[in-house]
Image (cartoon, helix red, strand yellow):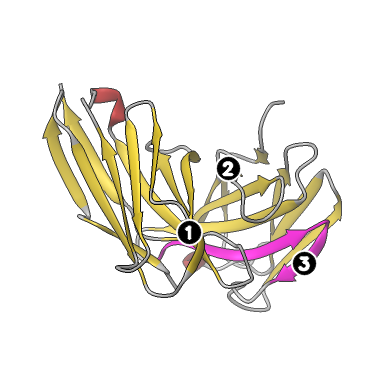
Amino acid sequence: DAGVIQSPRHEVTEMGQEVTLRCKPISGHNSLFWYRQTMMRGLELLIYFNNNVPIDDSGMPEDRFSAKMPNASFSTLKIQPSEPRDSAVYFCASSIQTGTEAFFGQGTRLTVV
Amino acid sequence: SQQGEEDPQALSIQEGENATMNCSYKTSINNLQWYRQNSGRGLVHLILIRSNEREKHSGRLRVTLDTSKKSSSLLITASRAADTASYFCATDAGGSYIPTFGRGTSLIVHP
């Protein structure tokens, strides 16, 4: 398996634009996590899916952020409209089930100018 | 909010020395995990230790867990320059089993 695949690796966008980050989890994994990493706040959990269903989205900063998982092999994180303070590295991770090791993608470095 | 907090924030040692990093947490946990992150890369899982376990080994890594003190330590023996990375502990508390990460320890191993 190629591991968790995220795209794009880098994204530079202007303030106010819509940004969509994509994630393909490892096949057979039932749990999927979206994290955001910044120097100021460290690694924050944004949202967690189990069997494609959002379970906990309390970490989503505001209504500008939304996440979907239409099937077991694909998830998106959308920011609309984007703001400079959204600049961060966004990680997707998956695990066979909760309480087991999580496998991380390489991350998407988002810069909003 | 972070559940686990690593200490020290930064550690600089010479190749061949041992490196010890600590993690403290606030509430009872189900599991505690340690991850490594090389600069510009994703996190890589190192070890998972369950709340009923006290010690685990994996190669040059040794993890201990003291639930009475709500703390864990990661020991890297005979460190190598390639061990240079940030190390994070992640805890999952209560019924959620969702890993929550600390801010990490930045380890530099000088050749």
State how far apart marks 1 and 2 are (Cα).
Answer: 23 Å
Residue B59 percent location from the top left of the image: 38, 26
The chain carrying label 3 is A
* Mark 1 surroundings: few (<14), some (14-19) or many (≥20) residues within 10 A: some
Residue depicted at x 58% and y 42%: A104
Q: Position of residue B103 (x, y in %)?
A: 35, 59
- Chain bearing mark 2: A
**What SS does tag 2 mark?**
strand
Tell me the residue that label 3 is attached to.
A54
Disc 2 target residue: A104
Rounded to the nearest whole Å, what is the CA distance between mark 2 and mark 3? 18 Å
Q: CA distance from mark 3 to mark 1?
A: 27 Å
- State the residue at coordinates (56%, 44%): A107
Q: Are marks 3 and 1 in contact (CB under 8 Å)?
A: no
Q: Position of residue B80 (x, y in %)?
A: 24, 23
Q: Main secondary structure of the magenta part?
A: strand
Please provide percent x and percent y for residue B97: 61, 63
**Who is closer to the viewer here, B93 or B108?**
B93
**Residue type of the residue flagged with mark 3:** Pro
Relative depth, front residue between A61 and B109: B109
